Amino acid sequence: MGFMTLINIPCCFMLSKQVFAALADYEKQKKDGKDPHFMAKDIGLDTNLLSFWK
């Protein structure tokens, strides 16, 4: 389990930019009184490279 933890920690750091962007988008939508919906393009992800989150 320790080895898996060592692998996962750097991955969490590499994805933190997208996580914080998604959180900011969610909070902005809530502040605007909307029902939040996640759209990959709203946080800067290229939807042409994704098979999900379009």
Image: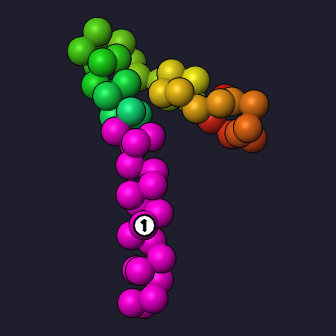
Q: How is the image coloured?
A: rainbow
> Which residue is pictured at 28% across the width and 25% down the height?
27
| Residue nearer the viewer, 41 or 36 | 41
Q: Could you tell me which quadrant the N terminus lies in? A: bottom left
Determine if the magenta segment contains residue 15. yes
Q: Amino acid at mark 1?
A: Pro
> Which residue is pictured at 34% across the width and 39% down the height?
20
Which image quarter: residue 32? top left
> Which residue is pictured at 45% across the width and 88% down the height?
3
Left or right: 36, with 40 as reference point? left
| Residue nearer the viewer, 32 or 6 | 6
Residue 26: x %, y % from top left: 35, 27
> Which residue is pictured at 24% across the width and 15% down the height?
31
Q: Secondary structure at mark 1?
A: helix
Residue 34: x %, y % from top left: 36, 12
Q: Which residues are magenta?
A: 1-20
The residue at which mark 1 appears reads as 10
Residue 8: x %, y % from top left: 45, 71
